[in-house]
Amino acid sequence: MPLPVHPSDPQGLSHVRRAVAIASGKGGVGKTTVAVNVACALAGTGAKVGLMDADITGPNVPLMMGLKELPPLKDQKIVPAENFGVKVMSMGFLVKADDAVIWRGPMLHGAVNKFLKEVLWGELDYLLVDLPPGTSDVQLTLSQSIPLTGALIVTTPQDVALLDVRKSIAMFEKVKVPILGVVENMSGFLCSHCGKTTDIFDRGGGERAAEALKLPFLGNIPLVPDVRAGSDSGHPIVLTQPDSPASVAFTEAAKKLAAQVSILAAQESGRMSNVWKL
């Protein structure tokens, strides 16, 4: 079911079926890397995918997606850039690479709403929204501006990351956004020379947290240098090395995410059927 049409936005979100937030409790856990690779993996299944970079003060999606500029405006609306079958919007297209975006809450709120309601996203099966770390203005703006299908939580295995994950999950619960699952990133360093795995940041913490909180666990992403190299070069690893362990893990996480979205849709359909019977 498409998102409700905003009165001043007859086109921007009217053909978006599902909006999914990609979130983390703290920075440095590879949330954007997960968002980019999951977006490309979903697009690889034939889905129509958009990726909105809502990290207004630290936009990295254009670099990771190999994009530098937006197409020309169309009817005074912003046309998202596109690569690898994914439509992209980011503050990174609007400011110079070495400029700092130093904005207070109201300006961040305005930017997020502009990206949602003044961008010609067109028909999308998924709009993934890469959030900044934490639980502040952008997260609240997003959850109050559109009906989110749910949130994907990214963490690393160590306790300090998991502590902040619980705060992020609590925030989404307070604003009535379902948690679609947890992804554990940097889950063991996989050596390309000897093939052995070293648990630099520990291992299994994300899975244990998901189990304790009764949330779906969507997978472990290994720490591999090629993931970093692909992000820096604008060529996501799921596309350049689809059979690598990291790519397989990203693709599996994307499939499980899609499955969780379908489960929620079925549950919602069942609830509506019961309402009509009443």
Image: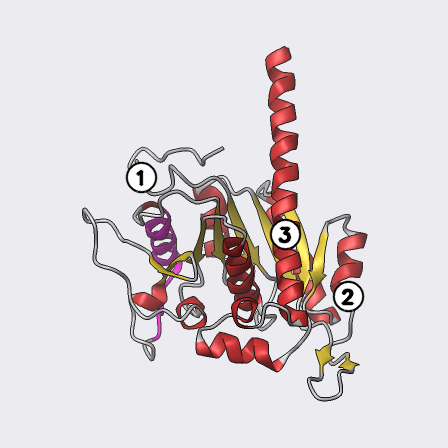
Identify whether 209 is placed above or below 203: above
Sequence-earlier tag: 1 or 3 = 1
Q: Quadrant of residue 123?
A: top left
Sequence-earlier tag: 2 or 1 = 1
Q: Which residue is mark 2?
A: 205
**Discs 1, 3 touching: Cβ within 8 Å:** no
The chief SS type of the magenta part is helix
Q: Residue sitting at 51 percent across and 76 percent down?
A: 230
Tell me the tag on residue 255. Answer: 3
**Discs 2, 3 touching: Cβ within 8 Å:** no
Q: Which residue is mark 1?
A: 11
Q: Within 10 angstroms of label 3, few (less than 14), some, or many (20 or more) residues?
A: some
Tell me the tag on residue 133. Answer: none
Amino acid of disc 2? Gly
Q: Pinpoint residue 129: horizontal percent, then vertical percent.
A: 48, 54
Mark 2 vs mark 3, CA separation in Å: 22 Å
Q: Secondary structure at mark 1?
A: loop
Q: Secondary structure at mark 2?
A: helix
Q: Residue sitting at 60 percent across and 22 percent down?
A: 272
Residue 20 visible? The answer is yes
Mark 2 vs mark 3: in front: 3
Q: Residue sitting at 63 percent across and 69 percent down?
A: 243
